[in-house]
Amino acid sequence: MSTLLVIQAYSNDKSAHLDRLNQHFITSYQQAHPKDRIIFHDLIKDSTPTLNSQMLMALRKKQHQKPLSAFEQKLLCEHDDWLNDFMLADKYLFVAPIQQRFLPTELKQYLDLIVATLTEMAPHKKALHLQATDRTYHPRSLKYFWDTYKHKHNLGNKYLQKLLSFYGLKDFTTLHIEGLANCCTSCDLSLKHCQKQLTKIANAF
């Protein structure tokens, strides 16, 4: 039995299409892996601890085995809860829109918190990044333009992949859901195509 950690950083009222695809993947995954455990972290609704000066001081004191105040102990307990879920998971699903050509603030804050004390990850772990935008950043007609746009405009996906790779996670897959601001027919076709892809990914994930 494996554990899937779903880390979502989007608002349901602003990202209905992304939420629809996220739910489709989870349903497909549960059907393909009925015995697996799924943990959910909604970074918009949940209060993620901030890696601020107080948290850094508490982590430093713990590292050097210095006395902690009650407030610092509370901070570390919150940090450990989030870190333990991340370390427990075998698979990760990151679901987020592109914001300012990068990751949402909530997801970046979460990653900062996790990697503050993260050690090397087990080699069997894998991640899927489900990323959505109303625009089209990855034209599929010519490889040259695809490569150009990928590196120029999609900094968030590149950052997430490199960050996880640094800690040992090499099995990283990205599914870009783009052009969601197009006409309804075009958008529906795009969503159906993505759902088929997600079903295949979920079965093998």
Image (tube, helix red, strand yellow):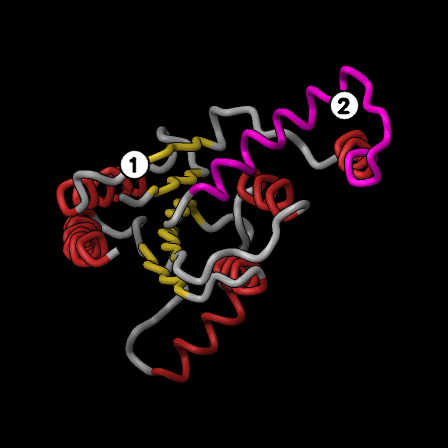
Circle 1 residue:
37
Q: Are marks 2 and 1 in contact (CB under 8 Å)?
A: no
Q: Residues within 10 Å of mark 1 (few under 14, many from 20)?
A: few
Quick check: 120 above or below 72?
A: below
Residue 32, image x and y in percent? 15, 47
**Location of the C terminus (image quadrant):** bottom left
Q: CA distance from mark 2 to mark 1?
A: 31 Å
Quick check: 141 above or below 3?
A: below
Instruction: Residue type at mark 1: give it.
Output: Arg
Residue 196, image x and y in percent? 14, 55
Instruction: Residue at 45% x, 41% y: name it.
Output: 88
Q: Quadrant of residue 51?
A: top right
Residue 112, image x and y in percent? 64, 45
Instruction: Residue at 75% x, 32% y: name it.
Output: 55
Instruction: Residue at 31% x, 49% y: name it.
Output: 181
What is the secondary structure assignment of the residue under circle 1?
strand
Is residue 103 visible to the viewer in this orientation of the structure? Answer: yes
Is residue 189 visible to the viewer in this orientation of the structure? Answer: no
Residue 86, image x and y in percent? 49, 41
* In front of the other: 7 or 72: 72
Q: Is residue 73 left or right of residue 30?
A: right
Tell which residue pokes out farthest to the front in this image.
Answer: 65
Q: Residues within 10 Å of mark 2 (few under 14, many from 20)?
A: some
- The magenta segment is 61-88
Q: Is residue 186 left or right of residue 57?
A: left
Circle 2 residue:
72
